[in-house]
Image (cartoon, helix red, strand yellow):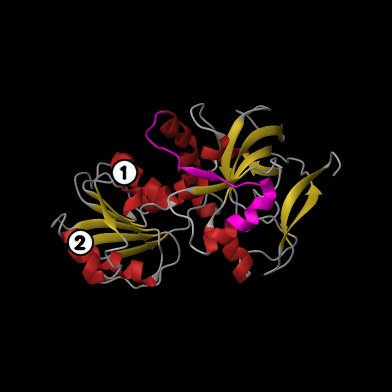
Amino acid sequence: MTESHQKALLLESKNGALVLGTRPIPTPGAGDLLVKIHAAGLNPVDWKIQAYGIFLEDFPAVLGTDFAGEVEALGEGVEGFQKGDRVFFQGSVFDGKNGGFQQYALIAAEVTAKIPANITYTQAASIPVAFMCATFGLFAPSPLAHYPGQPAVVIGGSSSVGQYVIQLLKLSGFSPIIAYASTKHAAHLNSLGATHVLDRTTTPLTPPALHAAVQAITSAPIPIVFDSVCSADAQQSGHDLLGPGGTIVIAGLSLIKAAPERTVVPVLGSVHPPTHRAFGRVIIANIAGLVEDGLVVPNRVEVLPGGLAGIKEGLAKLQRGEVSGVKLVAQPWAA
């Protein structure tokens, strides 16, 4: 490897293998930051891009949409940053060049946040994708100001997205906040703001069972359900919990139709589409302060061994459903 090249984990072709290789270190253009990546979070979309051949057409490609690192160089016109700043940001699933599974990447400065001093690179790498999904889902469709004191349900409460949803619901004043998750994570979810945890191992994810379990906690109409599991059963069960005027937010594609006086909101939690950019900038401007003040706590992380090489097994664990309650994070500069 030369000084102008970097190590990267490359997706060779559509549905192809992930292989270690090298690629040029990019040069930042106007408005861009070149970031030396110290931590890259793994997401289910990474293995799905490889397995299903979605989103990307140009290969070899670099996956990974959760990044944290330090500013290496600034493009023309960038203000508010300097070399050495610790930053975190969200990549795009449609890019293929500036993914996190490499040692350097470019990102637009306007959607880059500085890492507060109270968290590490690995913790910061757990934030961008999941927090964006939670925030877009809860706040982009309509404000939550008129919901304080009302109940909410989070299906998949221990997932990366679910943990941020719980915290944002708490900040918005919802109560009770009912999480459907494994009770082995109950203490942690309670610390984030969940008032009740329904055990997914004993409560089937079917409309009658989930409805009965929620009704045992509250008889109040449910104005909002956030589903981060995204199966058809989860979506239908969450939808059927809603009271009149209620909304189910789905962290992905909708597989159901809304009944009268109910709303189904599928979420693309990304700052990159032009339609999302303005709201995304608002989130970016506020996220570091929320974390620094302790109002938002990053996911617990599991650091993968082997640097970039360890990502393949991490993605396999995600695909097999063997990850629960933690965010898998790789360190591209580790041996």
**Residue 45 relative to residue 82: left or right:** left
**Residue 143 relative to residue 72: left or right:** left
**Residue 50 relative to residue 207: left or right:** right
Instruction: Looking at the image, tell me whether mark 2 or mark 1 is earlier in sequence order.
Output: 1
Find residue 257 and report its horizontal and vertical position in percent: 34, 73
- Quadrant into which the C terminus falls: top right
Q: Residue furthest left?
A: 219
Does residue 309 belong to the magenta stretch?
A: yes
State the separation of the CA atoms marked 2 and 1: 19 Å
Give the residue at mark 1. Answer: 187
Find residue 255 and report its horizontal and vertical position in percent: 40, 72
The residue located at (40%, 46%) in the rendering is 164
Give the residue at mark 2. Answer: 213
Numbered disc 2: secondary structure = helix
- Answer yes or no: is residue 294 visible: yes
Q: Which residues are magenta?
A: 293-314
How many numbered circles does the render carry? 2
